[in-house]
């Protein structure tokens, strides 16, 4: 719910509170004598049963996150923009431009005064969420940057790229603090700080989740993906659990099986057939 009040019979309104829940709100009435006082209560979400808000970019949307109270959403898109939206109305608050290629990831800082984004242009960009302006451009990655997140105290940023590099940046002066080298032959897709910011978790295409003592640049533990796969298979198809095997090869599994190449083939317009022919699939508009 959103609460508003007026002292001039609804000619103008002042916001009292937003995103209210429950059936009671205690309010210290302002000392504004008037015989034309009104209170307005607006149901923000859902405004009607089954309503869905479409937040529209010009191309694929690669990530989306709410802020803490759910009033805003930040999105990253292949159209090269980062957008902050009003999640109750669907209106754009800021459209932030600075990336030259696809933006893969964007998220708020803990205090929500800043946001960070990561893109195919090898850049990490920090934004002012109140103005929508660029605060800093962090350069140092040599390949597409896949994710970027703030530490829980807001003092650091961690970013990852498709060459196995994980970089940690200081927010105080927007300089690089260190680089953690994972596997140069594998993509590091994501990284995030632990709640106390003493450790770091990274995950990538090699089937491993790595937990880092990042201050000492040491890997504490590996979490093997096949165990989770076994657990998942037990839930959905117990008879097939025996088919889940642990990969023990030295070459990362995604490279060994050329998974990334096969995924890229999904987006190819020409599909080869075993018969020797081929199909061409292109997007078009409905009549």
Image (cartoon, rainbow, N blue to C red):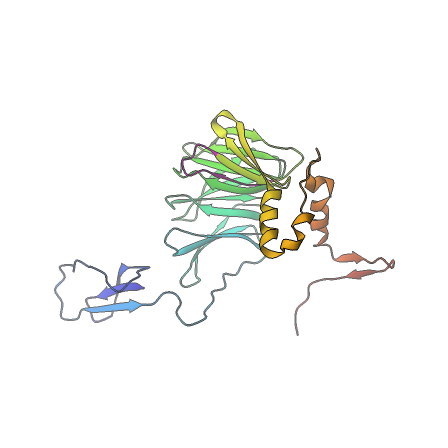
The residue depicted at 13 percent of the width and 67 percent of the height is: 34
The residue depicted at 23 percent of the width and 63 percent of the height is: 24
Q: Magenta includes 189?
A: yes
User: Would residue 41 be found to the left or right of residue 178 on screen?
Assistant: left
The N terminus: image quadrant: bottom left
Q: Magenta includes 266?
A: no
Foreground residue, 161 or 186? 186
Foreground residue, 31 or 164? 164
The C terminus: image quadrant: bottom right
| Residue 21 position (above or below residue 161) | below
Asked where in the image residue 156 lies, by quadrant, the reply is top left
| Residue 23 position (above or below residue 213) | below
Asked where in the image residue 239 lies, by quadrant, the reply is bottom right
**Magenta segment, which residues?**
188-199
| Residue 208, position as x, y percentages in the image | 60, 38
User: Would residue 21 be found to the left or right of residue 116 on screen?
Assistant: left
User: Would residue 251 be found to the left or right of residue 124 on screen?
Assistant: right
């Amino acid at each position: 719910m959103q609460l508003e009040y007026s002292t001039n019979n609804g000619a103008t309104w002042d916001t009292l509170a937003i995103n209210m829940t429950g059936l009671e709100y205690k309010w210290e009435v302002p000392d504004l004598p008037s015989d034309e006082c009104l209170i307005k209560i607006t149901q923000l979400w859902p405004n009607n049963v089954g309503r869905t808000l479409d937040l529209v970019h010009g191309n694929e949307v690669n990530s989306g996150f709410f802020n803490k109270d759910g009033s805003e959403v930040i999105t990253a898109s292949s159209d090269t923009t980062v957008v902050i939206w009003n999640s109750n109305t669907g209106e754009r608050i800021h459209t932030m431009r600075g990336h030259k290629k696809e933006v893969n990831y964007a998220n708020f800082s803990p205090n929500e005064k800043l946001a960070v984004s990561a893109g195919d242009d090898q850049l990490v960009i920090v934004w002012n969420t109140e103005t929508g302006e660029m605060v800093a451009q962090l350069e140092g990655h040599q390949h597409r940057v896949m994710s970027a997140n703030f530490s829980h105290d807001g003092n650091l940023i961690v970013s990852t790229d498709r060459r196995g590099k994980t970089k940690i940046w200081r927010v105080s002066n927007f300089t690089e603090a260190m680089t953690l080298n994972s596997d140069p032959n594998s993509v590091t897709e994501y990284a995030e700080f632990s709640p106390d910011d003493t450790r770091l978790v990274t995950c990538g295409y090699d089937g491993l989740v790595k937990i880092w003592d990042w201050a000492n640049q040491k890997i504490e533990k590996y979490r093997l993906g096949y165990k989770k796969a076994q657990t998942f298979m037990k839930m959905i198809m117990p008879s097939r659990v025996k088919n889940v095997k642990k990969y023990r090869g030295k070459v990362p599994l995604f490279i060994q099986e050329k998974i990334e190449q096969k995924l890229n083939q999904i987006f190819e317009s020409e599909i080869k057939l075993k018969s020797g022919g081929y199909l061409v699939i292109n997007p078009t508009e409905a009549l």
